[in-house]
Each structure stands twice: as structure tokens, then as C-alpha cells.
Image (cartoon, helix red, strand yellow):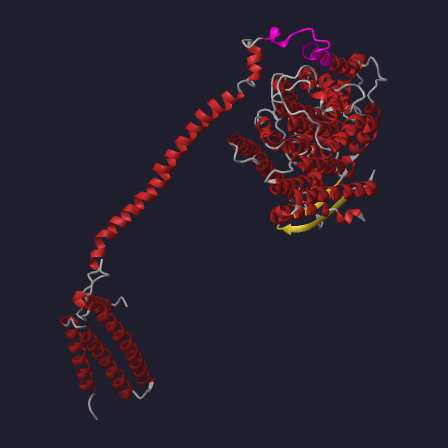
């Protein structure tokens, strides 16, 4: 059986990549993808711990999380499309009409 | 059977009010007939109730309202005679108004407001508790504001309405303070009330007045007197009444002569046991009333506006009624009968005089008596009906005013014997002046040469009819009803659990005939030398039983008659061209300081408006305004400015750059993790 540490290593690697993307990227679609990485790293942890400690709660929770991520992606991309139609760009540095 | 429908006396005028208000302009004459019918139905109901309960029953209906209060109807002799008078006089005035207001574009509004006024006045009369009375009292005030300002496009009318509203408000605040004090005092007695009894109900008040501390009673009485002073135009809150003549003449007749202004007198009569028990309560009432009677009568002497003469006369006669109640300190509940009798009689002849004046104004088209003269040639009906009214007001023998006013003067004499002669002297002087100014008015309007080119025609029959009916009552009522009236009203408080002997001891009065030892001795000393003639003429005296038997010398009985006839003759010598001996302008020129003082109304306008309102009140208002702006608004504005300034600085945090938010988020999580870890290390968590 694959040791638990490997799953945690995989999850934290994914989480770090996602976080790095959030810090560095300015493209809205890329940011959405980074957020997906963050969410899925958490899902991996949930499923892994659930398998090692015989209890299905974590897996059920992961399913909820996936559904939530799908909804979030739907809303997020809808907003991005609206922004693109309005400004002709999805570079978020240029979209700052509501700051201050 | 009629008693079951007593609520309709108020409900029907309210219905007429709603109908006139919403559909009045579709109806002929603004729906005035609805108002007349509603009031007339009230008259029929009142007569029915009278026939059922006269002479020794009362009606008391009540239902719970909220908490410790109820709504109810209380018809005792006092309320019943008032109900009859108001419905009767107001029915006639509404009928007259159908002619007077014909063609006025606001007729529907007039009749709506008049109906609401009628409803509130009637509700005030038969309210069974003080709170309900106060509510209707305020409604009456509102209607008076609306009706005085009926021609609201006229600046003077709008100003008069505002003045009336504000002046009576001063009294109303005192009245409310009195009610609250009374309620607190009654509540602190921890009474065990039977089901259906409430603290502010009149029977409950009457029954427990004696248990309230005397100093509190005086405060309460002064508060209630304040309300009565405001509503009944007594000094110093009388200033609104002469100005209130800006409304249509029917309004003057209805509100400022016959009904509304009597509400104050009615209140004092209604709360008579309380006033009686309060030390100085009735003394204050007598002082205010007698002074007002004289004060207003002097101003009536010089006014040129026919309606202002009548207005001053109303103030003066209300003073008589107040004084009549006040001297109850000497004669007990008999004073209520005497005073209310004058109230009823006065409402007949004053309504008659106002409506007659309205008839004259309707034809002549001016209020100024200097432009009239000789009107009698063209308006026979108006002239003779007004003559009856004037004779009655002046107190000419056998007319209504003679019986009622003279009885007040006689009991004022008894008060003089026992306590203080000042009210008596003032009232006698006021009676002389009453006769003079009344006939100055009558002579200079109806006799003599025509002093200007005015409209010469008699008024329509719908206006003359009420005049004739009122004239019959102004003549015959006093003669016909006096004895029964006194005995009926004297029985008013017998229906309640109230012990006047005990109240008198609290209030420091001692009634003759009551078993108070030191009082009897006092009476022996003071009363005995005065008894010259015990078989005096005033008819009501016989009804008094043990009270007021001191008797008056014959000249006290005769004096009012001499005063009335003398006054009329004196007025005739100045103003009646057939017997004219003196020219008023020779006796008093324009420079005469006394004449100027009276004409200016004792400079009340200058003092009250010019000095008091514009200096004291305006100055106080300015200071309050400054405190409001600098202090109350000030700290609030400072706070909000500070919050705004702070926000200006920290709003920069919202950069709109996603990376900054992410950074803040991650940093926050890191800090949180570090803190929690450290806390666990230390053992805090």
C-alpha cells in the first residue's frame, strides 16, 4: 500500500504550485486554474485520510467539494466572459474600476 | 331604549364628516343637509334620553380599551343639559350655514369640518373618563384650527388659526400634566377596583378625590384650570379668541360663542369635586374668571369690528361662568347649576347675536360698525331678533341673561361675605360695561344715519329662521327653566359617591349648614349681620336646601337690574340718535390715553407679540437653535467627520490587484497558524 506521506507530499506540491500561480499570474483564466489546483489538493488529502482511517466521510466530503468547484468555475468563467465583453481583456491588472 | 343608541350622537356626525369630505362636492350645497340631519338626529336622541332618565337616573356605559383605560358614555344631568344645548344650537347654526355658505367653493370642506367639530364636542361632553375627554378636547382644538383658518388663502385667517392653535396648546399641555398627575396619585392609592371600573373614570375620581394629598390636589386643579383657561379664552390665554373671528361668522357662532369655548367651563364643572377639595382651587378659578370678565368687557367698549365686540363679550361672559364656578367655594354645588345655567343661556343669545351679526355682514359686506348705521330700516327681522339677544346679554329683567347672570352676581356676593369681595366688585363693573357695549353695538348698527353706501336687503329665510327660534329661547329660557334647572343640576353629584362635607374640610371651605363646628361659628359671626331680608327674589335660592341661606340685602338683589338698565340708558345717551345727549368724540378724543389703551387692547398685541414673542420667545429659540446646532448636532457631526476621514486613509487598502488580496490572505493564515501553534506550545489552548 502506498504510504500516506506520498499522498500528502503530492497534495502539498499541488497546493504550492497553485499558490505560486495565484501570486504570479495576471490572466483571469490562469487564476481560475490555480484555484482548481488548490481545491483538488485539498480533495486528495480528504480522500487519502479517509482511506487510511476506514471512514467514508472524507470521500463524501470530497464529492461535495468537487460539485462546489464546478459551480464556482461556472460562475467564475461567466464573470470572466462578461469582463471580456466589457473591457476586451481578461488581464486583471487592467480591471480596477471598483478599487478605493 | 334611546340610551342604547347614545353612541350614535357622536357616530352620526362622524359619518356626515366622512360623507361631506369624500363625496360632498357632488352634493347640492356641499352636503350641508347631511351635517344638519346628523346633528338633528343627535338632538332627537338627546331629547329621547332626557325623557327616559329625567329627573333622577343617569346612563353609564363602558367597555375596556387598553391596559388601565376604557371608553365609555356617561350621561348625568350635567352632560345631558350640555348635550341638549349643543345639539340644539348647532343644528340651528348648521341650518343657517346652509344659507350663509351657499356658493362658497369650499362649502363641502366647511360642512365636513363642522360635522367633525360637532362630533368631537359631543364626544367631549359625554366621555366617561378624563383620557377620552382629553382626546375629544384635542379634536375640538384641531377643528377650531381648521375652521378659523377656513379661508386659508387670507394671511390674517391663517395667522389667526395658528395663534388659536398655539395658544390653546399652552393650556392643553397643562391639562395633560394635570391628568398625568391625577393618574399617578390615583394609581399610588392601590385601589381595588370593581370589574368595569377604571382609574380615570369620573365616578372613580369623585369617589377617591378625598384620599389624594392636598398639595397634589392643588397642583392637579391648577393644571386642569390651565387647560380650561386655554380653551375658554380666560386671561392670560384669551388672546386667540378675538382673532378667531377671521373664520366664517357661522364658525364664530358655533365654536367661539356657543359650544367649544364652553368646554373649559364644562371641564371645571365636571371636575368640580376635585376643585372643591383642592385648597385654593376654586379661589384661583374665581380670580381668573372675575378678572377676565372685567378685563374683556373694557376692551369690548372700544372695538369697531362688530364681531370683535361680540368676541370680547364672549370672553367676558365666559369669565362670568368661571367666576360662577369659582364662588362655589362659598355655596357648594349650587354654583355648578348657576354657572351652567348661564352657559346654556349664553349659548342661546350669543349664537343669536353672532348669527344676527352674520346676517348684517352678509348684507352690508363689512364688519366695521363705523360704516353701518340705520341698517334696521332694511333688516327688520335681524334688528328685532338682535334686540332680544342684546337685552338678554345686557341682563334686562325677565330675559334669560337676567336670570343667569344676576344669580352669578348674587352668589359672588355670598362668596364676598365669606371670603373676598373682589370678584363681586369686578363682576358688577363687568355687568355695567356689558350693558353699555352691547347697546353701543346695537344702536350704532341699527339706528341713526346710514354712514356708507351698503347693500340694503334682508337675509334669506333659511338664515332668519334660526334667528327667530334662538330669539324665542334667548327670551324665554331663563324665565321658564330656572328653578327646575337648578334643582336638576344640583342633583348631579348625588349620583356619585362623593362627600362634599369631607372635601370641603380638605379644601378649607366651610359650607353653611354642614356640620363643621368651627365653620358654624364663623358663619354666625359673618353671616348674621348681613341677613336683612331673607325672602329675597331670586327663584333658585329656595332649592338650595342647607346651602347659601345667608341671604342678601335687598339692594344686592336690585343692583343687577339697576346696572343693566343704567348701562343701556348710558349707551343710548351716547349712541341712540333719538335721545342722544353726548357725542362720544367730545368725551374721549383720539388722544385720550384711556381710550387708546382700550382700543389697543391694553397693548396686549405689542406686549405679547411684539415683546414676548419676538424678544423673549424668539431669543430663547435662537439660543436653543444654537445649542442644537453646536452641541447636539455638533458632536454627531464631529464623529461622522472623524469616521469619514479615517475611512479616507484606510480605503487605500482596496487596491483592486488580485495578488495583493492573495498575499494578505496567505499572510493571515500564516500568522494564524503561528499564533495557534505558539499558544499550544505554551499551553493556552
**Of residues B208 and B275, which is closer to you in this image?**
B275
Which quadrant of the view contains residue B353?
top right
Q: Residue at x 56, y 32 (%)?
A: B164
Residue B12: where, in percent of width, then height?
70, 47
Q: Is residue B675 left or right of residue B342?
A: left
**Of residues B170 and B448, which is closer to you in this image?**
B448
Residue B491: where, in percent of width, then height?
80, 34
Q: Residue at x 59, y 40 (%)?
A: B106
Residue sticking out furthest to the left: A24
**Magenta run includes residue A65:** no
Q: Is residue B573 left or right of residue A95?
A: right
Q: Residue at x 20, y 59 (%)?
A: B653
**Of residues B126 and B668, which is closer to you in this image?**
B126
**Of residues B138 and B474, which is closer to you in this image?**
B474
Residue A87: where, in percent of width, then height?
20, 67
Is residue A4 visible to us here?
A: yes
Query: Where A12 sits versus B499, above or below?
Result: below
- Quarter of the image for the C terminus of chain B: give it: bottom left
Is residue B501 visible to us here?
A: no
For the record, the magenta segment spans: B567-588
Amino acid at each position: 500500500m502506498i504510504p500516506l506521506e506520498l499522498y500528502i507530499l503530492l497534495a502539498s506540491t499541488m497546493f504550492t504550485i497553485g499558490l505560486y500561480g495565484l501570486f504570479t499570474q495576471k490572466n483571469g483564466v490562469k487564476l481560475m486554474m490555480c484555484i482548481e489546483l488548490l481545491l483538488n489538493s485539498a480533495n486528495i488529502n480528504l480522500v487519502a485520510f479517509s482511506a487510511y482511517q476506514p471512514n467514508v466521510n472524507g470521500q463524501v466530503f470530497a464529492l461535495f467539494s468537487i460539485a462546489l468547484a464546478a459551480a464556482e468555475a461556472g460562475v467564475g468563467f461567466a464573470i470572466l466572459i462578461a469582463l471580456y465583453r466589457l473591457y476586451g481583456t481578461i488581464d486583471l491588472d487592467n480591471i480596477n474600476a471598483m478599487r478605493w | 331604549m334611546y340610551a342604547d343608541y347614545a353612541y350614535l350622537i357622536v357616530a352620526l356626525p362622524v359619518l356626515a364628516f366622512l360623507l361631506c369630505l369624500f363625496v360632498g362636492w357632488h352634493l347640492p350645497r356641499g352636503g350641508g343637509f347631511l351635517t344638519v340631519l346628523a346633528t338633528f338626529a343627535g338632538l332627537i336622541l338627546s331629547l329621547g334620553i332626557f325623557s327616559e332618565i329625567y329627573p333622577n337616573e343617569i346612563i353609564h356605559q363602558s367597555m375596556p380599551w387598553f391596559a388601565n383605560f376604557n371608553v365609555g358614555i356617561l350621561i348625568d344631568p350635567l352632560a345631558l343639559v350640555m348635550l341638549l344645548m349643543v345639539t340644539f344650537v348647532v343644528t340651528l347654526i348648521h341650518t343657517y350655514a346652509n344659507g350663509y355658505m351657499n356658493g362658497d367653493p369650499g362649502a363641502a370642506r366647511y360642512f365636513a369640518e363642522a360635522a367633525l367639530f360637532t362630533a368631537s364636542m359631543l364626544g367631549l361632553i359625554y366621555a366617561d373618563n378624563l383620557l377620552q375627554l382629553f382626546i375629544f378636547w384635542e379634536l375640538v382644538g384641531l377643528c377650531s384650527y381648521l375652521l378659523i383658518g377656513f379661508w386659508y388663502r387670507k394671511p390674517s385667517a391663517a395667522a389667526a388659526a395658528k395663534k388659536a392653535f398655539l395658544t390653546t396648546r399652552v393650556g392643553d399641555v397643562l391639562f395633560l400634566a394635570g391628568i398625568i398627575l391625577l393618574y399617578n396619585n390615583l394609581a399610588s392609592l392601590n385601589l381595588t377596583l370593581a370589574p368595569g371600573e377604571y382609574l380615570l373614570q369620573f365616578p372613580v375620581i369623585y369617589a377617591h378625590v378625598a384620599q389624594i394629598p392636598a398639595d397634589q390636589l392643588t397642583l392637579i386643579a391648577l393644571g386642569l384650570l390651565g387647560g380650561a383657561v386655554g380653551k375658554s379664552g380666560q386671561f392670560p390665554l384669551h388672546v386667540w379668541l378675538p382673532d378667531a373671528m377671521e373664520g366664517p361668522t357661522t364658525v364664530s357662532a358655533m365654536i367661539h360663542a356657543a359650544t367649544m369655548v364652553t368646554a373649559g367651563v364644562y371641564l371645571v364643572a365636571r371636575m368640580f369635586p376635585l376643585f372643591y377639595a383642592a385648597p385654593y382651587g376654586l379661589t384661583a378659578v374665581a380670580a381668573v374668571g372675575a378678572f377676565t370678565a372685567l378685563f374683556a368687557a373694557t376692551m369690548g367698549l372700544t372695538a369697531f369690528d362688530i364681531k370683535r365686540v361680540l368676541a370680547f363679550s364672549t370672553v367676558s361672559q365666559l369669565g362670568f361662568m368661571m367666576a360662577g364656578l369659582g364662588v362655589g367655594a362659598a355655596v357648594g354645588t349650587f354654583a355648578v347649576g348657576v354657572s351652567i345655567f348661564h352657559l346654556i343661556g349664553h349659548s342661546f343669545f350669543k349664537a343669536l347675536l353672532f348669527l344676527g351679526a352674520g346676517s348684517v355682514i352678509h348684507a352690508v359686506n363689512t364688519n366695521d360698525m363705523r360704516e353701518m348705521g340705520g341698517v334696521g330700516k332694511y333688516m327688520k327681522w335681524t334688528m328685532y331678533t338682535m334686540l332680544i339677544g342684546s337685552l338678554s346679554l345686557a341682563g334686562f329683567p325677565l330675559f334669560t341673561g337676567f336670570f343667569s347672570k344676576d344669580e352669578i352676581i348674587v352668589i359672588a356676593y355670598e362668596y364676598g361675605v365669606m371670603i373676598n369681595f373682589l370678584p363681586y366688585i369686578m363682576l358688577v363693573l363687568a355687568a355695567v360695561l356689558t350693558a353699555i357695549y352691547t347697546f353701543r353695538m346695537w344702536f350704532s348698527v341699527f339706528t341713526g344715519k346710514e354712514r356708507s353706501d351698503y347693500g340694503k336687503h334682508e337675509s334669506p329665510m333659511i338664515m332668519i329662521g334660526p334667528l327667530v327660534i334662538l330669539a324665542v329661547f334667548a327670551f324665554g329660557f331663563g324665565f321658564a327653566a330656572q328653578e327646575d334647572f337648578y334643582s336638576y343640576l344640583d342633583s348631579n353629584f348625588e349620583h356619585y359617591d362623593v362627600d362634599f362635607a369631607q372635601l370641603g374640610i380638605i379644601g378649607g371651605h366651610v359650607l353653611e349648614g354642614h356640620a363643621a363646628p368651627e365653620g358654624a361659628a364663623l358663619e354666625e359671626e359673618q353671616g348674621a349681620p348681613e341677613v336683612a331680608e331673607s325672602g329675597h327674589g331670586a327663584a333658585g335660592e329656595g332649592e338650595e336646601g342647607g346651602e347659601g341661606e345667608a341671604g342678601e340685602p335687598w339692594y344686592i338683589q336690585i343692583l343687577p337690574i339697576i346696572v343693566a338698565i343704567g348701562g343701556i340708558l348710558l349707551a343710548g345717551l351716547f349712541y341712540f340718535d333719538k335721545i342722544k345727549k353726548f357725542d362720544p368724540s367730545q368725551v374721549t378724543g383720539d388722544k385720550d390715553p384711556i381710550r387708546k389703551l382700550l382700543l389697543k387692547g391694553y397693548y396686549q398685541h405689542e406686549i405679547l407679540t411684539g415683546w414676548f414673542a419676538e424678544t423673549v420667545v424668539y431669543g430663547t429659540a435662537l439660543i436653543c437653535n444654537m445649542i442644537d446646532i453646536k452641541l447636539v448636532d455638533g458632536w454627531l457631526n464631529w464623529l461622522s467627520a472623524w469616521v469619514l476621514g479615517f475611512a479616507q486613509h484606510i480605503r487605500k487598502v482596496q487596491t483592486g490587484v488580485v495578488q495583493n488580496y492573495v498575499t494578505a490572505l496567505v499572510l493571515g493564515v500564516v500568522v494564524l497558524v503561528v499564533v495557534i501553534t505558539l499558544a499550544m506550545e505554551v499551553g493556552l489552548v
